[in-house]
Structures are given as C-alpha cells and as structure tokens.
Image (tube, rainbow, N blue to C red):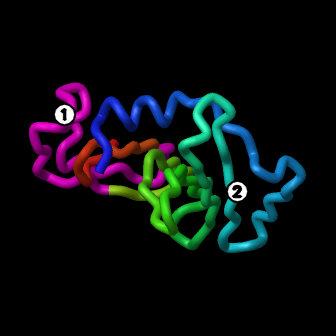
Amino acid sequence: MFTNKEVKYLLNLDKRLKNPTQVVDLNNNMNTLELYSPDDNEYKFRVDISTNRKIILKASLHHMESNSYSGLLRVDFKGRHTNPTNANQNVPINVAKYEGKHFGQDFILMCWKINSNFSI
C-alpha cells in the first residue's frame, strides 16, 4: 500500500506512452495503454479506458508492479458513485467532508488512492 506522499509523487511523474502510435477505439469495452516515466524508470503505469451502460467513459491510472496493479486515479464521465460513510485517519480533512456523499450522473468523478478505499 502506498502512502499519500508516494501516491502524490507517482501522480506527478511525467508519463509517456510505451507505444505512442497505439489507437484507442471507444467501440471496444476496454482499451489499455501502458505508460512509463522518463524521470523515474523504477515505475510503470497503465491507463484503462472503458465504457459500460452505467458510465459513459471511465479512465483509470494504475501503478504496475509484478503483474499486480494499484489504482492511483480514476475519472468517470457521466457515472454514479456513493462514497464510503466512514473516512479513516488517513483521509485528508478537505476530502473527508464527502463521506457518504452520492454523486449522480451529471458530474465527472475524479478519485485517487488515499491509503484507504475512500474517494471523491
């Protein structure tokens, strides 16, 4: 599990496509892009872009490590989401105010890993 500081570091790294000519076809239910950082080659990333009947477009950024993926960031366009009702001590105060909040279809959800399953 990453600390908040590590997640912030990973999110702020410059990232490049492993295959810069790869095409994203939104007719596919899932597209995956592999990324790397020229600033820190210890880390590899992937972006999953998917669609389904509940969410028009979902993009997730993952840290890749030995065939496991740790989610770092997710963006849902026209999706629905309800936050967990109990934020732990690792959730920053400015985010904890969204405990239990339900977001309807008229918003864009951005959430990131915060050392718990809490998101905004």
Read off the magenta span. 82-109
Can residue 76 be seen in the rendering of this structure? no
**Residue on which disc 1 sits:** 97
Secondary structure state at the residue bearing disc 1: loop
In the picture, the disc for residue 46 is: none
> Which residue does the image show at 43% across and 54% down from the upper left?
71
Give the number of callouts. Answer: 2
Give the amino acid type for the residue marked by disc 1 in the picture.
Lys
Secondary structure state at the residue bearing disc 2: strand
Where residue 45 sits in the image (x, y, percent)? 58, 50
Give the amino acid type for the residue marked by disc 2 in the picture.
Leu
Quarter that holds the C terminus: top left
Q: Is residue 52 above or below residue 120?
A: below
**Closer to the camera in the image, 21 or 85:** 21
In the picture, the disc for residue 33 is: 2
Magenta segment: does it hold 3?
Answer: no
> Which residue does the image show at 59% across and 49% down from the upper left?
44
Within-10-Å neighbours for mark 1: few <14, some 14–19, many 20+: few
Mark whose residue sits in front, 1 or 2: 2
Name the chief secondary structure element in magenta: loop
Residue pushed farthest front? 42
Question: Splitting the image into 4 quarters, where does residue 50 fall?
Answer: bottom right
Q: Is residue 11 above or below residue 103?
A: above
Is residue 20 shown left or right of residue 109? right
Upstream in sequence: badge 1 or badge 2: 2
> Which residue does the image show at 33% across and 30% down from the upper left?
5
> Which residue does the image show at 84% across and 56% down from the upper left?
22
